Amino acid sequence: MMTTAHQFAHNFLREKGFKRIPSTFLHKYEGIMPVKNTEFSLEISFYELDFIDFPEYRLLNIPEGLNPHLPHVEPDGSLCYLDKEFIYLDRYNPEDNFVLCFQCVENLLASYAENDTRKFSQDYADEFTAYWQGKFFAYIKSWNYPLQALMFDRYSILDNAKEKTEHEIIIFNNQQEANTWLKLRNAANTAHSNKTIPVIVTKLTQPKLIRLFEKWPLSSRQEFFAWLTAIDPSAAQSFISSLLTVIKNNRSSYVVLQTPGGNVGALIEIDKQIVEALKRSQNQRQNKKGNKPASPSSILLRKSLVKEKFFLINVRDASDSRITTRNQDKEFSLVGKKIALIGCGTVGSFTALLLAQLGAGIQDNTHKGVLALFDPDILMPDNLGRHVLNMSYVGENKALAMADFLTNQAVSNTINFIGNNKRFDVKNLALFSKYELIIDATGNEAFSTSLSHYYHRSETLNVLIHGWVIAAGKAVRAILDDRTGACYRCLRISNQDGELQERFKLFSKDKEPPDPIKRNCGNAYFPYASGASASAAALIQQLAIDYFSGNPSPRFRHSSLSLDVQHTKNCNPQKLDICPCCSKIL
């Protein structure tokens, strides 16, 4: 169907010298785009002009005389000229959008015509992994050497009938890491699941460009080594050095190439005769006897008399450090930290999950991290509407259940989630002295006040964070108490009648919080969505991040979730001289 936007695009391209070519579903055109005295042959195709997907421009060949190494070009010639993840084109302005896309392609082709090799090399290095086209996915669970790899078959978690498997590779340092991964990934018991292969890691400082229209991807050991030698001779020598160690006991190895744009890899199997030639060459060089030995480089470039296994793999970093630091502006995580979380209800369950996603409870190289969870209560069906846990945990202790849930969800084998279902005496805080951070997510004002009271009378406890839902679910707040400013109780002041009220008011005079819903005795509650609990947990998570990063300011944080609640600025409130909790020893 030719809409008004399609008719505009048709007329525009026809004026530019493009001709429409037959196509069943797509609007497709071919033509020449002249840019800076260079003619580029292009194919343009599009379907709907709603700009969910941008028009596709495909380069049909490289003009003679240009650098054959071109970044932002897919293996089939498709051009990457706009990043739709960061560019929004309004569907209600399709004509201008179509022209903009055309102009962006012109600008890209102009950069090609200028033959700026230095810029090409940097651009290509940044997107190098997109051109690798691996056969299987490999996941690196550890960067601790020596590394080994295991290929296994896995069932989709959604394939209850277990009718189909797919290959996957895990790269690991010790068997416990592999066992944890195989369990989490629903591995099938197959013959090749028991055969581990050594892994060689080689760093590429600056991967150069592949030729877009020459044979690619790499398909043999000779092609791989010739390519590696051409783009980075020092990396090739490093690879040879590691390979000479590996072939003493193995003809096969995985190689992982670390590049500025990410990791890629390959499985390389070497013919037995080539292996023997490499060993002889190595012995001759070490013993310095006989004729001058053939170089390992020349041996690796020899053709094999038998078929060798070789295929590229897509490598993804699944290590603890990568997972826990990827979403931080700075390389920061909670790995190796000792954290105690009191309360595993609605706010506490979300808090535990958010902390675990930042690495809480994971051991680093020098410190045994721990996330200790404390709550004496039992999970009930009524809790499920605002809780992380599901029906399978109903009737279980919340702290023990959350520890189990996090353990089952974790991809690390060095996790340390501890659940404590005992009701402890808030006067006895000695058990918290070993933790770097104590988090109160109980939402119980009496408990939080008492915890703050005894915290300020302890010389061994470190830092305390309180986080809670307030105003019947219409706002959330959190405060970090490190004894330099206001405590939890400082947020409540007495009015003229001696009644406690909020230091930072929540409601204006014409607004009042709703009354709780009362069921049977002791089960009154405020109805609000789980998003409020998640918001409170998010404030706690960010305070924890800022504290361990060395910049906890502002220590008091507020987020309004309703227009009924007044805005309160985040700040560093001073302690009150009359505060019975932190300013007086009673």
Image (tube, rainbow, N blue to C red):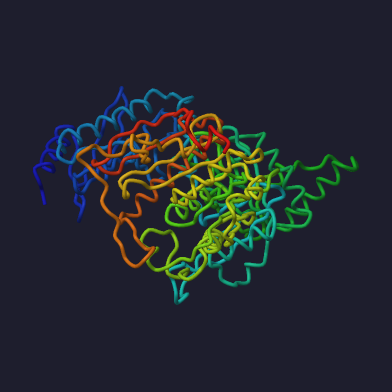
Q: Is 113 on the left-hand or right-hand side of 118? A: left
| Position in image of residue 342 (x %, y %) | 53, 52
Among all residues in the image, which is located at the extreme left? Answer: 4
Residue at image position (28%, 31%) is 104
Image-quadrant location for residue 51: top left
> Which image quarter holds the C terminus?
top right
Question: Is residue 279 placed above or below 553 in the rendered structure?
Answer: below
Among all residues in the image, which is located at the extreme front? Answer: 497
Numbered-mark total: 0
Q: Is 12 on the left-hand or right-hand side of 475? A: left
Whether residue 55 can be seen here: no
User: Which is more toward the observer, 366 or 62?
Assistant: 366
Q: Is 77 on the left-hand or right-hand side of 222? A: left
| Position in image of residue 248 (x %, y %) | 79, 54
User: Which is more toward the observer, 563 or 332?
Assistant: 563
Question: Is residue 163 placed above or below 236 in the rendered structure?
Answer: below
Question: Is residue 56 placed above or below 484 in the rendered structure?
Answer: below
| Position in image of residue 251 (x %, y %) | 71, 57
User: Which is more toward the observer, 118 or 572?
Assistant: 572
| Position in image of residue 465 (x %, y %) | 51, 41
Whether residue 31 can be seen here: yes
